[in-house]
Image (spheres, rainbow, N blue to C red):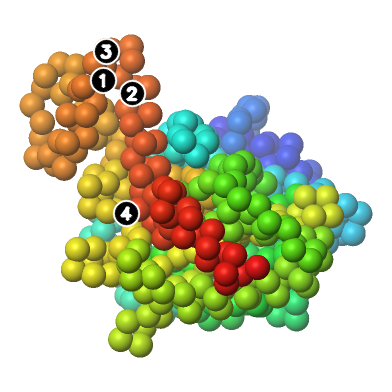
Amino acid sequence: MIQSIEDLIFYELNHHVIEQRDVVYVRNQLYRLLSLDLTEPLPEPKDILYPAIAIETILNDLELKGLLDGSKVSRDLLDTKLMTVFTSKPSEVESRFFKLYKQDKQSATNWYYDYVHHINYIRTERIMKNQSFITPSKYGNLEITINLSKPEKDPKSIALSASAKSSEYPKCLLCVENEGFAGNFSRDARDNHRMIGFDLNGSNYYFQYSPYIYYNEHAIILNALHKPMKIDGQTFDNLLTLCDTFEGYFFGSNADLPIVGGSILSHDHYQGGKHVFPIEKASFHHKWTKDNLTYYLLNWPLSTIRIQSKDKISLINKAVDVLQKWQLYTNPSLLIYNHSDGTPHQTITPIVRKINTMYEMDLILRNNFTNEDYPLGVFHPHADKWHIKKENIGLIEAMGLAVLPARLEQEFQAIKKHILNHSPLSADLVKHQPWIDHLKKLSPTKDSIDDIIRHATGEVFMQVLEDCGVFKMNKLGISTFKRFIEEEIL
């Protein structure tokens, strides 16, 4: 354990999280936290690639000594407390960020991104466990990630969570009150969480990175107030302003309705980062130019209108117009209803980018209407794809990056054994039977089966996205979508 503590200190010193002047203080704080006494000469520190290498060894030693209860949550609660010894106060982090920002915007985000890696807020070692691959489709390459980075709670953690005292603080995982929050068996620890506060069009927002990034510099922008998601003119203005504020980043928002929205609709927030998603490379079926705006009907499974302009105000006004026209549109022949029983069904998932001096906005039309045939949503993944993906299609997946459940890792291994070795199919894999029959028809071998499964997974994800498209990318759907744009939008 002593060796790992010295390795951790050496790592943070080499990455300028602490200075040489801080070493004695930091060491004493760690020893106090771990109830250790320094009774032997210090070992020579060794280089490590990331903090978790040392932290895992420390936690393992504590478990062997019976000082941890063996639950994953207990480990997470302690490792953030170890790292907060190294972490600067929020005001100090902000001061460093804005000092760099005045010199160069990208230098500021580069430093902050590295910093949250070095203090182990971004869980590098867990993210490396994710299985990611690219699969071709008729819409271009799609990106697939089997999400193994966020550990599922083990039985002991679940039991401890059930007995933990419930609390409404913080109100949700995005609230500013999470910064430095100690955590408990029902809430994630955020001792080493640090955010950057800033003004966004007259309101207070915070910039942070996701601890379980799905793509490069996966950023989250959250409102200082705990208020619901809302897609309106202010949303479009905020997203475009963010592109000016954080150079080289795209920004987008989940839709603001259940089924077609993200997992946290109770807190106003956006996502962004430095990543070129498949939707950005999409081709188009039709193009129009009117006034100072250029419109595209994208060849994309989710019905998307792309608008480009150098005039930000014109773009915001037109986005509002598209939203309002879509909220009023109905087409019973395509099961598109704008409301039922007084409940609105239509909204937009917006994504924005700035390319040199040109602003670009993708407006994805969403509808959360349900009926007896599709109780989870007509434009939601249909039941024949639930064996791969049942959850809502939010912003990230709407742009062409699938975030698939961790269960698939073991299920795919079992499917491989069943196909190659004729091992019996367990009860929990019966849901995959039609898909397995399809895989068998492709004559997989030991050498080819992994590629076949990956490609077939990508096909299912493509079909999931097609399920969510309100205007299908067939002759009727494209012509109807084109008519909507020409008659309602232009």
Upstream in sequence: badge 4 or badge 3:
4
Tell me the amino acid under the disc marked 4: Pro
Tell me the amino acid under the disc marked 3: Thr
Residue denoted by label 2: 452
Q: Disc 4 to disc 1, how far (Cα)? A: 25 Å
Residue 442: mark: 1
| Residue at 33% in and 11% down | 447
Q: Disc 1 to disc 2, how far (Cα)? A: 8 Å
Residue ranking furthest to the right? 103
Q: Quadrant of the C terminus?
A: bottom right
Upstream in sequence: badge 1 or badge 2:
1
Circles 1 and 2: CB atoms closer than 8 Å: yes
Is disc 3 surrounded by few (<14), some (14 to 19) or many (20+) residues within 10 Å?
Answer: few
Q: Disc 1 to disc 3, how far (Cα)? A: 9 Å
Front residue (pair 148, 421): 421
Tell me the amino acid under the disc marked 2: Ile
Tell me the amino acid under the disc marked 1: Leu
Question: Foreground mark, 1 or 3?
Answer: 1
Residue denoted by label 3: 445
Is disc 2 surrounded by few (<14), some (14 to 19) or many (20+) residues within 10 Å?
Answer: some
Q: Is residue 90 left or right of residue 48?
A: right
| Residue at 22% in and 29% down | 438
Question: Disc 2 on helix, strand or loop?
Answer: helix
| Residue at 39% in and 70% down | 331
The x, y position of residue 101, in whole percent, is: 85, 57
Image quarter of residue 486 = bottom right
Is disc 1 surrounded by few (<14), some (14 to 19) or many (20+) residues within 10 Å?
Answer: few
Residue denoted by label 4: 381
Q: Is residue 130 left or right of residue 93?
A: left
